[in-house]
Amino acid sequence: MDIEAIHEMFEGLGPVTVKSMFGGKGIYHQGRILALVVAGEMLLKADKLSAGKFEAAGSTQWSYEGKKKPVKMPYWSIPDSAMDDPDELSAWVHLAYEAALRAR
């Protein structure tokens, strides 16, 4: 995913900074990480308050293979319906930023 496409996805939130990390990209707004691009897929941050919304919308949680078992990370795929609806996408992006603000 190129930088221009990332900025377009987050324009409803405001300016974002994109940094290379984990072999992908980290997306930040006002110093808080709210999304990752891993293996070409955009993943939005969630927490205990918002993860259920992502799950109910059919999103999948990102995990990787740890030494003994899969490790679940607090990032979820964007619901398919949001990819074709800028207003819906903006709502999910705002939800991710709210989770980023609550993170320690």
Image (cartoon, rainbow, N blue to C red):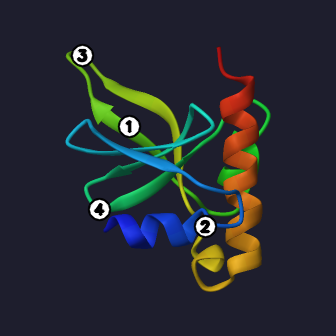
The residue type indicated by label 4 comes to Gly
Q: Residues within 10 Å of mark 3 (few under 14, many from 20)?
A: few
- Percent position of residue 41, x then y: 37, 60
Q: Is residue 65 left or right of 90 when viewed as pictured? A: left
Tell me which label, 3 or 2, sits earlier in the chain.
3
Above or below 25: residue 4: below
Pointer 3: what residue?
68
Tell me which label, 2 or 1, sits earlier in the chain.
1
Distance, label 3 to label 2, CA atoms, is 30 Å
> Closer to us: mark 3 or mark 2?
2
Pointer 1: what residue?
63
In which quadrant of the rendered view does residue 65 lie?
top left
Label disc, if present, on residue 23 of the rendered structure: none
Visible in this render: residue 1? Answer: no
The residue nearer to you, when weighing 87 against 10, is: 10
Label disc, if present, on residue 79 of the rendered structure: 2
